[in-house]
Amino acid sequence: MAELALSGCTTSSDHHYVYPNGVRLDDTIHAAAETGLSFHPTRGAMSIGESGGGLPPDTLVEGERAILDDCIRVIDAFHDPSPGAMCRVGIAPCSPFSISRELMRDAALLARDRGVRLHTHLAENEEDVAFSLERFGCRPGQYAEDLGWTGEDVWHAHCVKLDAGEIDLFARTGTGVAHCPCSNCRLGSGVAPLRAMLDAGVPVGLGVDGSASNDAASLVDEARQAMLLQRVTRGADAMSATEALRIATEGGARVLGRDDIGWLEVGLRADLAIWDMRAVEAAGSWDRAALLLAGPRRVRDLFVEGRRVVEGGRLVTVGLPILIERAERAVRALMG
């Protein structure tokens, strides 16, 4: 979250679906509040382990009743539906290959009963599509629709392998996509049909995925990578820098169901990111879109709902050196 803030990000969502050693979603919520980011935490879960034909180790799965009960607990404790809210909770079973059909359906019913959003992974790579065809007899988009996982209150991560029919389905239903271009490159998943999704009217925002599949968390870098991948596959005029920045701002707000963030306007939330375009990287730039092409990677100042989070390129809400040292100690302990 600190890295995201330093890249100019004011609002983030986290799909947290592994809870070892007593970890709870509450921990990420408290971390976001301390850092100062607006947060859309999602209560993820896995219920089918290796012994049941799923992918995760059995030690990381949870009982389905316990999953739903904890979703209710987190919503009751932290979800704020009011305008300008700093925390809105979502329900997010990990993926179709680690969750039962019944839990996917029950999660959708619970989310709509409680008025919260739904999120999961979908069609990230060819293996996902093959799994869906073999296990469910249909493509991932059809499986999602059958279980109530399409609509304006749903967004899916990746969607690299959506076909034309699935793109049309998402456009007709207003189903959103979190596009994660750097992760898709890192994992060799492929290039998502971003241009086709946007042209069809699918809501698209940007995601950084996680540290294990990206190695970085930068709003600007993701926008740049999204633009470059479309250009390398569809031609130099496939996407402009301005459009990529719009995906990073307005697009993300739309995917999260927010009409109070994503752009600057009287009456909206006071979220503001400021870059110093006098730095050497941007010397000679005159267009705001140069931020994506030649701008500095670290934001100069960041305000979230009027609160200063970054000042002069320095995170002021938390002690970054302490966080870095804590992370380094954890890595050393893990590596033995």
Image: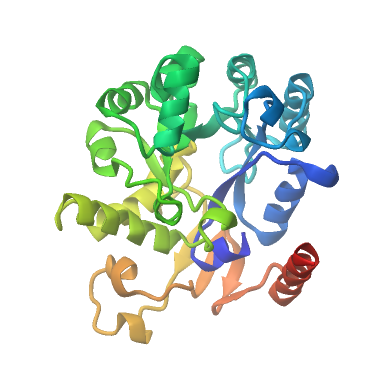
Q: Vertically, is 93 above or below 308?
A: above
The colour scheme used here is rainbow
Query: Is any part of residue 239 visible from this angle?
Result: no
Going by the image, does 193 lie left or right of 145? left
Could you say which is closer to the camera, residue 218 or residue 185?
185
In x, y percent, where is residue 184? Answer: 41, 50
Residue 23 position (above or below residue 70): below
Report the front residue among 143 and 5.
Answer: 143
Q: Quadrant of residue 318?
A: bottom right
**Left or right of 229 in this view: 127:** right
Location of residue 300 in the rendering, given as x and y in whole percent from the top left corner: 49, 75
- The residue drawn where x is 48% and y is 73% is 298
Assign the C terminus to one quadrant of the image: bottom right
Query: Considering only vertical position in the picture, is 261 above or below 177?
Result: below
Which residue lies at the image location 28% right of the left edge and 40% below the top edge? Answer: 193
Whether residue 329 can be seen here: yes
Q: Residue at x 35, y 87 (%)?
A: 280
Quarter of the image with the N terminus is bottom right
Residue furthest right in the image: 22
Task: Report the number of numbered marks.
Answer: 0
Residue visible at 53% across and 62% down in the picture: 215
Drawn side of residue 207 relative to residue 34, left or right:
left
Depth check: 317 or 133 in front?
133
In the foreground, 229 or 9:
229
In percent of width and height, residue 221 lies at 41, 63
Q: Position of residue 235 (x, y in %)?
A: 15, 54
